[in-house]
Amino acid sequence: MRTEKTHRTTDARFRPGHLALLVGAVVVILLPLLFTTRYTTNLLILGASWGIATLGLVVVLGYTGQISLAQAAFYGIGAYAVALGTTRWEINWWVALVLGLVAAALAGAVLGTTTLKLGGHYLAMVTICFQIIYTLVTTNWIAVTGGPDGVSNIKRPPFFVPVNTVQKYAWFALAALWLVAALVWLLRDTALGRAMLAIRENELAAEALGVDTRRVKVIAFILSATIGALGGAIYASGYLYISPDSFNFDHAVAFLAMALVGGSASPLGAILGAGLLTFLPEWLRELQRIYLVIYGCAIILVIVFMPEGLWGYVKLFGRRFARVRHLPPVDQPIHVGGHGTPGEDILCVHQLTKRFGGLVAVDAVDLTVRRGEAHALIGPNGSGKTTIINVISGLYVPSAGGIRFLGHNIVGQRPSRIAHHGMARSFQNLRLFRELSVWENVLVGAHRGGGRERETEARALAAIEFVGLSDKAFEICRNLPYGHQKLVELARSLAGEPELLLLDEPGAGLNQTEKQELVRLLKRLNEMGLTILIVEHDMSLVSNVAAVATVLNFGKKIAEGRVEEVLRHPAVVEAYLGNREVALGV
Amino acid sequence: MFEVHDVHVAYGAVTALRGVSLEVKSGEIVCLLGANGAGKSTTLRTISGLLHPLKGEIVLNGEPIHRLTAEAIAKRGISHVPEGRHVFPGLTVRENLVLGASNRKGTGRDERTEDLARVFKIFPDLERLQHALGWTLSGGQQQMLAIARGLMARPHVLLMDEPSLGLAPILVQEVFRVIKEINASGGTTILLVEQNATMALAISQRGYVMETGRIVLQGSAGELLKNPQVRDAYLGGGKAA
């Protein structure tokens, strides 16, 4: 395969690392010294609390790709917990805070769980409803919340230095902002954070790689809600008085605007956005009546012209300082195929039927794949091959019939469960995590093996090395040519050390020389003991890789046996091959 | 027919084309070969106006078109059948086809019926499926629909990006037969990007080979088929002849 060997592997993402955290710490110390009037210090506290709430949106929207217009409600839950806790209930500030965080986490779990199957505008609608219900409850449940009058005389946290002056409290608020930003930033490079990014980029592919997408989405909502509540608690003790107006739908929209203006996928972006939208109205206040117009237009302009938000510009600037990253040396070879007896049945499909409405896509098909075998599934377009792959990997539930994989009855199991039994798959129309690097893509695939981060990385390294993409590891997948993207998908499947690999048209879009390279890789994998079930239209590729073939037509099996015999079968030639010499390229 | 002259194109900071020049004469089938990422699809996208060159020009029948919008270029009779089909999933086959004619102004009902009849003659399956929604079609049917939609524009020039992608062998043969027929019967000029170089060269008169954003080789289809470099890089060595 021809690649530009001279191409440098530069990391396109700016990784400010510990330096940014250090600079942030200095800013935290300096800001309250620079903003000394009571008015500006209060703004600083407000900005910090809004920044924290926006960081919650970074987790749920920026990382996981789930829109939430209920962040003001969670912010309000934290605020009311501290407000009521330190006034009416007379409990310790910290206990009240913990109560608020727990309450928000529970509410986040409820919202996350009820919206599991929703996306896009439906999800937006449900979160808006949640937000409105919250506002109605806090306004009308006067006995508990004090209603529209709000709660006053809220206490500040008892601290090792008394946090009684506004300036000291501003330090406290900014320190909390700094800490949450650091944690959210660190989250990105954990298994959980990568799973979130994978869901944002391609939920189906994440699930097929073994990411329990439901669990991760609920966790994202819980984290986001908890972080939002922390912001609210800090706000309540900063202003010492709260009312339901500070937590209404307008504020939920404002938090979303802060995330979008700053750049929702980055903690620093969220802080920039929150800071800008806190101070901009104050700067514009002199313009009096037209200030809201300018404020609104500024937000529209940023969103239209800076789709990545302010962070996008910081990133461009930071790219100059990006260092060249190299992969560490590979310390273990790729390991695939498991440890069973060669020749035993590992996948048994029995009388499998799949209907879509009135259309029978797969009609009572039996298929057995033995360990160590490379098995081809061929047939005309629309004959049900991809449907079978989708049913086996759990994306579709069969209408009838049974599937056993390594002794497990996998009918009705979620794709992530099936992946954990040792199955991996590729997709016909690539499903990569396009905005992530090759390295991150393959790491998500490597999670399946479990163990520590080091072991996950070792598996990913071996897989990238195996497909020959080591010099492209830190490139963003979107920028790679199609042939390389196909290899990324293969490496991502292999990194989880599968026992059975399902390939859906791996050769499509490759030229004849690239296909020979693919044949070489697949043969090596098969020799290592990996069982392969391959759907492919290039007969020269099929006959070079597979020993056994099953042929489908109109959802039914029409032939099965050794590849060279099957390809001579008159029914197969008629329905599928056409001119046999041309099809086989001989 | 049309000429591409020293065209440079970049995606942001990434340069995709570094001075591509090629010429397609009226009534020809010309194929464009090259590895993944060489810039073949980018070349087609630039000709059809989805991308605009930083430098260089594209001339159609004496008129420079590289500053025009994709819509204006489509109105001048260049039709692009994109890679990966891009069938409108929520529309029926018939609606997909009718939209293909939207480059022409005020097409009457008679004219539309006539055009539909013409493409249904080439693709009888589509007539049977005309009320099915785009997403319910199999890969092969979608490819046929994409080509048929391209033909509805009554193009003078058809740009085809990997029409055989993901098709069963029998359909690959069918697609190439159809391309030849479109060219022979309607005199439509065709610029073809294909990974299946052997079959593409078999129906083309001439070909160009691209590498990292440049044209590195050109010649008649016969010459390219015999060229050892081409055989090595794109035809899988000596085997496929």
Image: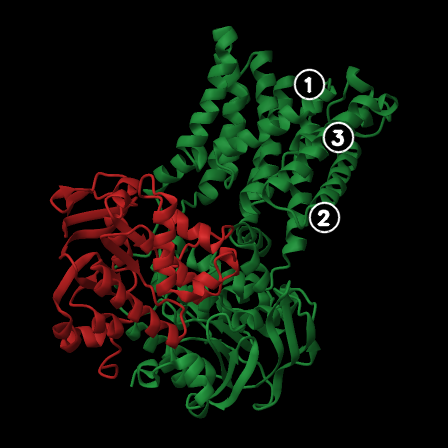
Chain colours: A green, B red
Q: Which mark is residue A113?
A: 2
C-alpha gap between disc 3 and disc 2: 17 Å
- Dot 1 or dot 3: first in sequence order is 3
Q: Quadrant of residue B105?
A: top left
Query: Which residue does the image show at 52% across and 75% down from the upper left?
Result: A501
Quadrant, the C terminus of chain A = bottom left
Disc tally is 3
Q: Depth-wise, is mark 1 or mark 3 nearer the camera?
A: 3
Quadrant, the N terminus of chain A = bottom left
C-alpha gap between disc 2 and disc 1: 33 Å
Q: Determine the secondary structure under disc 2.
A: helix
Residue B208 sits above or below residue A256 on the image: below
The image position of residue A155, as x and y in percent, is 76, 22
Q: Quadrant of residue A338?
A: bottom right
Query: Which residue does the image show at 21% across and 76% down from the upper left?
Result: B232
Q: Quadrant of residue B73?
A: top left
Query: Which residue does the image show at 60% across and 26% down from the upper left?
Result: A171
Amino acid beneath label 2: Thr
In the foreground, A266 or B151? B151
Q: Which mark is residue A239?
A: 1
